[in-house]
Image (spheres, rainbow, N blue to C red):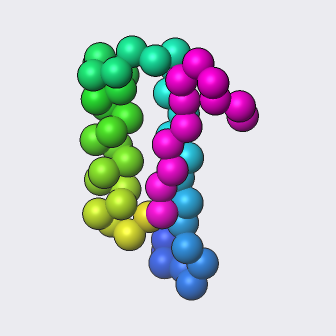
Amino acid sequence: MGLESDRPVYLLGLSSPPRRNRNRDILLQELLRGAEEAGTKTEREGGKDAEV
């Protein structure tokens, strides 16, 4: 059973309250960038006005 699929893969990155350029924010940015490079569609949500 492989991971290959005809369906696109999506990744939603959720961040905690707005503390831009802090460790968690930087890690999330890098995670999403790596996922995009691998062909995954990504979206990032977070901050004080985010609704999940």
Apparent side of residue 21 relative to residue 8 in the rendered image (left or right): left
Q: Using the image, determine if residue 3 lies above or below residue 32.
A: below
**Magenta stretch, residue numbers:** 41-52
In-image side of 51 versus 41 (left or right)? right
Q: How many marks?
A: 0
Q: Which residue is drawn at the image coordinates 55% and 46% (left, top)?
A: 12
Q: Is residue 10 above or below residue 26?
A: below
Residues 8 and 46: in front is 46
- The residue positioned 49% from the left and 78% from the top of the image is 4
Task: Decide which of 12, 47 is in the foreground and name it.
Answer: 47
x%, y% of residue 44? 50, 42
Query: Would you say 25 lies left or right of 4 here?
Result: left
The single residue placed furthest to the front in the displayed view is 49
Image location of residue 50, percent across then percent down: 64, 29
Question: Is residue 1 something one can see in this rendering?
Answer: no
User: Going 33% across and 65% down the picture, which residue do you hit?
Assistant: 38
Residue 35, how many percent across, how many down?
A: 37, 56
Residue farthest toward the bottom in the current orientation of the protein: 6
- Residue 43 on the magenta segment: yes
Residue in front for this viewpoint, 10 or 1: 10
Where does the N terminus fall, quadrant-wise?
Answer: bottom right
Q: Position of residue 3 (x, y in %)?
A: 49, 71
Looking at the figure, which quarter contains the C terminus? top right
Residue 44 vertical placement versus 52 (above, below): below
